[in-house]
Amino acid sequence: MLKIGDIEIKNPVVLAPMAGVCNSAFRLTVKEFGAGLVCAEMVSDKGILFNNEKTLGMLYIDEREKPLSLQIFGGEKETLVEAAKFVDKNTNADIIDINMGCPVPKITKCDAGAKWLLDPNKIYDVVAAIVDAVEKPVTVKMRIGWDENHIYAVENAQAVERAGGKAVAVHGRTRVQMYEGKADWNIIKQVKEAVNIPVIGNGDVQTPQDAKRMLEETGVDGVMIGRAALGNPWMIYRTVRYLETGELIPEPSVREKIEVCILHLDRLIALKNEHIAIKEMRKHAAWYLKGIRGNAKIRNEINECNTREELVTLLMNFVEEVENKQQSNAQAV
Ligand SMILES: Cc1cc2nc3c(=O)[nH]c(=O)nc-3n(C[C@H](O)[C@H](O)[C@H](O)COP(=O)(O)O)c2cc1C
């Protein structure tokens, strides 16, 4: 069983942290589809320390989401330690994760995110200071390196372990790759072989079969799924079932997909407000509709929606349209 510190995680399937996506509304929905662990979107250490209202709102966790890992980012030891202390004392997160993978220039130019990857000694220093300051288990999510000439994944993971970190998640790309090219699972395997703390593999798990292959090929303790879960929480459920029983459950019907989309929408409205939720939901709705034939028109129309009623009417009309088409196709056969 995957265990991070004292936190027992009932299966090895982990929802990746995703900024602008992994708030409580989405995490809870994914949790209900069986994820062993859900990760929250990254939160700025300085935002916490300056009591920024929006940032503090990002620390909200519904009890039903637990176990949950809350990720903070920053480029300085002192502020990261203080923010970790705040998360430790004032949130019901189970795990505090440090972001050492974000490739975005706005983040790396402040020495945060993937910038840490260039110096294992600095990683040791900051992780040890955070571990010292908090009670919750501390973990690190990292990329394999900065660029192909600076791949210190093994040294960096060993530094995390020596500093008292309780797990590492490794995305098999360098910072320079951003989201391009292929994730290098071989380096994830090397990390797994080099440390004794749990290693969670990440990158390019698009199907339940990929998850199984990653576990088998790299020996990792958990598999983290990001983009494949966007608008697709049943990817998590299908993966959990596939790993447990070998059974590949069929994709849900269009109606099921849209019903989950509306559940997600209602949770987002409850979390934020209707105006913000509808705006945020536009991208999610497009993800839920991905792969459904004839979705081009509705994807454009969604961007014009301003209320729950408009969006739900649009989605439900689309379901009926698709179902009618399916029925007449079936009759024609
Ligand atoms: C929209 C989006 C937002 C992301 N935000 C974060 C983040 O806040 N923290 C983090 O560590 N990684 C973040 N990532 C990276 C993912 O956690 C993950 O490492 C990456 O997408 C590779 O996994 P995948 O191939 O399963 O998508 C983000 C990725 C995406 C697509």
Image (spheres, helix red, strand yellow):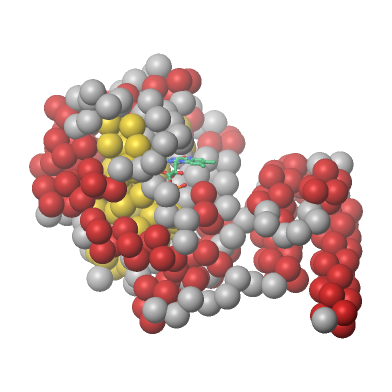
Q: Is residue 123 left or right of residue 248?
A: left
Against 332, is 128 above or below?
Answer: above
Query: Which residue sits at x=88%, y=66%?
Result: 321
Residue at left 29%, top 62%? 215
- Residue 296 visible: yes
Q: Which quadrant, please, contains the N terminus?
A: bottom left
Give coordinates of residue 137: x percent, y percent. 26, 52
Q: Is residue 212 above or below residue 201?
A: below
Q: Please, which residue is most extreme toward the top here?
A: 109
Considering the image in quadrants, where does the C terminus appear? bottom right
Q: Residue 21, relative to residue 49: is it above or below?
A: below
- Find residue 243 and report its horizontal and vertical position in percent: 37, 73
Coordinates of residue 62 in the picture (x, y in percent): 52, 60
Image label count: 0
Quarter holding residue 38: bottom left
Would you say 124 lies left or right of 69 here? left
Q: Quick check: can you spot residue 81? A: no
- Identified at 35% across, 58% down, the residue is 223
In the orientation shown, which residue stands out farthest toward the front?
Answer: 333
| Res 220 quadrant in image | bottom left
Query: Residue 278, relative to residue 102: is it above or below?
Result: below
For the residue pair 172 and 262, the one nearer the viewer reads as 172
| In-image side of 330 versus 162 (left or right) | right
Q: Position of residue 120 (x, y in %)?
A: 17, 29
Residue at 31%, 52% in the rendered image:
201
